[in-house]
Amino acid sequence: MGIQESITKISSTAQEELFACQEAKEIELLKVKYLGKKGLVGLLMEELKTTSKEERPLLGKLVNDLKVLLTSQFESTLATLAAKERSRQLEAEKIDVTLPGRESALGKKHLTLMMLDEVIEILKGMGFTVQYGPEIESEYYNYDALNFAPDHPAKDMQDTFYIGPELLLRTHTSNTQVRVMEKSPLPIRIIAPGKCYRNEDINARSHVIFYQVEGLYIDSAVTFSDLLVTLEELFTKLFHKDLKMRFRPSYFPFVEPGVEVDIHCIICDGKGCSVCKQSGWLEVAGAGMVHPEVLKSGGIDSEIASGYAWGFGIERLAMLRYGINDIRLFYENHLGFLSQF
Ligand code: DAH
């Protein structure tokens, strides 16, 4: 094939190949193939040396024209591709400034605190004021001042998180009782809400952390029926029902007599279900008349004053109210769960 034919052939294949190119890197390859050091146009230049002196100037011009043509075609196609890519990018980055903004989600109170607020509001309405006791507590206020025997099993490491000698994470809000007695004149009518900690296995029914609300009322002639009426009023208001309650004798070192307070199962209306373990009753609180020894720890003469106290868990009330069957949900921070309330 003569040089002239080669030029025509190379020119047309180059056009076809260029036409098929979609991306800049394909064109770069074509540039190498045709215009690179060992490219096809370069080979033609070599071949020129084998032609006669007469033909050479003309053929040389033709080869050079081919080189100029291909160079400009490659460059202009590259430029077109780059322009397309830029406008594609601009399109992708386009923002519609007239669109309404995205609202950022607002946080809200945790279910436990909502339940706690409700309890506090009801009790405030009944004349109680709120006092907060420490979560890091001495063994004295958590146990000894409350008439626990020195070898009481609850003091065991099994149940209590000790964080130093004589220092622990309070296991109940009853720790606040004697602290309040020590600093307040009678009558005392307080509630003490807050977090408590127990060294227990974590499962659907118990956790190492939970909220309680303690109630304490001490005056010259507080009676057991005052306790009864107060708790009845509280639980009726909380569960919005004509609630049935019962008190079962029980033992807590800091009260005498001590009781456990049950309400008629609000899930099955007392008929018996898995939540109330078929008994028709749900235990909701411990309570009793403040033990004379505890009054004594608080510097109060049991000859001139008497009092009642109670303590109950907040998560349990929320579980009953909303039919939640696993206390661990309160501490897992699942927004899907929490946002339902
Ligand atoms: N502190 C007890 C507990 O955590 C609950 C309790 C029972 C509190 C009887 C009281 C009470 O004030 O009188 O299990």
Image (cartoon, rainbow, N blue to C red):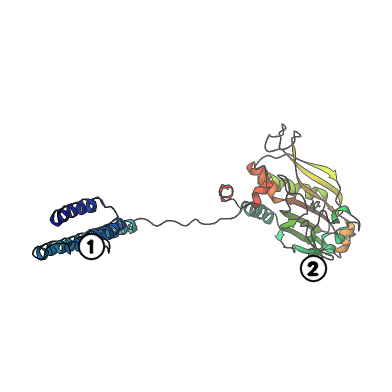
Please, is residue 158 above or below residue 325 in the view?
A: below
- From the viewer's side, name the closer residue of 43 and 163: 43
Q: Which residue is mark 1?
A: 42
Which of 283/102 is in front? Answer: 102
Instruction: Residue 239: give x, y in percent of width and height.
Output: 66, 43
Residue 174 marker: none
Q: Quadrant of residue 219?
A: bottom right
Q: Amino acid at mark 1?
A: Gly
Q: Secondary structure at mark 2?
A: helix
Query: Disc 2 versus disc 1: distance between alpha carbons?
Result: 103 Å
Q: Residue furthest bottom?
A: 183
- Residue with the mark numbered 2: 183
Residue 92 can be seen in this image = yes
* Quarter of the rendering containing residue 325: top right
| 332 w.r.t. 57: above or below | above
Q: Residue furthest left?
A: 54
Identify residue type, mark 2: Lys
Any atom of ligand 1 within 8 Å of the CB at mark 2? no
Q: Is residue 227 above or below residue 87?
A: above
Q: How many marks?
A: 2
Residue 158: x and y in percent read 83, 53
Q: Residues within 10 Å of mark 1 (few under 14, many from 20)?
A: some
Residue 71 visible (yes or no): no
Quarter of the view holding residue 178: bottom right
Q: Which residue is located at x 78 percent, y 50 percent?
A: 227
How far across and down, in percent of the image, does residue 179 sit? Answer: 80, 65
